[in-house]
Image (cartoon, rainbow, N blue to C red):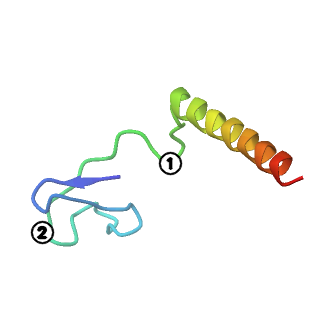
Amino acid sequence: MPWCDGCSRFWTTDALPHDRSCPSCGATLPEGVGGEDEKAPWHFKLLVAAVVVYLSWRAVQMITRVV
């Protein structure tokens, strides 16, 4: 996402004109580093897996207590 230092704001690439100027102040914004295909870090995936395992275990506990 392009960042405008003058406005202190992120802009989506769809909101920018073709010349990549800021819609608010008119400054030329640099090409963004990275892109839409950026992958999630490994520790985020580990956290999601741990949450799924924990919630699954809690669901099993709830079902065994109800039955």
Task: List x then y, in percent, for residue 32.
Answer: 33, 45
Picture residue at 15% right of the left edge, 58% below the top: 8
Q: Which comes sooner in the sequence, label 1 or label 2?
A: 2
Mark 2 element type: loop
> Would you call the spot at circle 1 few (<14 residues within 10 Å), some (14-19), or many (20 or more)?
few
Q: Rounded to the nearest whole Å, what is the CA distance between mark 1 and mark 2?
A: 25 Å
Does 52 appear above or below 67?
Answer: above
Identify which residue, 30 or 61, lies in the foreground: 61
Identify which residue, 43 or 25, lies in the foreground: 43
| Numbered badge on residue 25 | 2
Identify which residue, 19 or 60, lies in the foreground: 60
| Numbered badge on residue 36 | 1
Task: List x then y, in percent, for residue 20.
Answer: 28, 60
> Would you call the spot at circle 2 few (<14 residues within 10 Å), some (14-19), or many (20 or more)?
few
Q: Are marks 1 and 2 in contact (CB under 8 Å)?
A: no
Does 12 appear above or below 61?
Answer: below
The amino acid on which the numbered mark 1 sits, given as a three-letter code, is Glu
Picture residue at 74% right of the left edge, 38% below the top: 57
The amino acid on which the numbered mark 2 sits, given as a three-letter code, is Cys
Describe residue 54's horizontal placement relative to residue 62 as left or right: left
Task: List x then y, in percent, for residue 13.
Answer: 39, 61
Picture residue at 52% right of the left edge, 28% below the top: 43
| Numbered badge on residue 21 | none
Does 58 appear above or below 2?
Answer: above
Picture residue at 53% right of the left edge, 37% below the top: 40
Describe residue 37's horizontal placement relative to residue 49 as left or right: left
Looking at the image, which residue sits at the far right?
67
Q: Quadrant of residue 34?
A: top left
Identify which residue, 62 or 57, lies in the foreground: 62
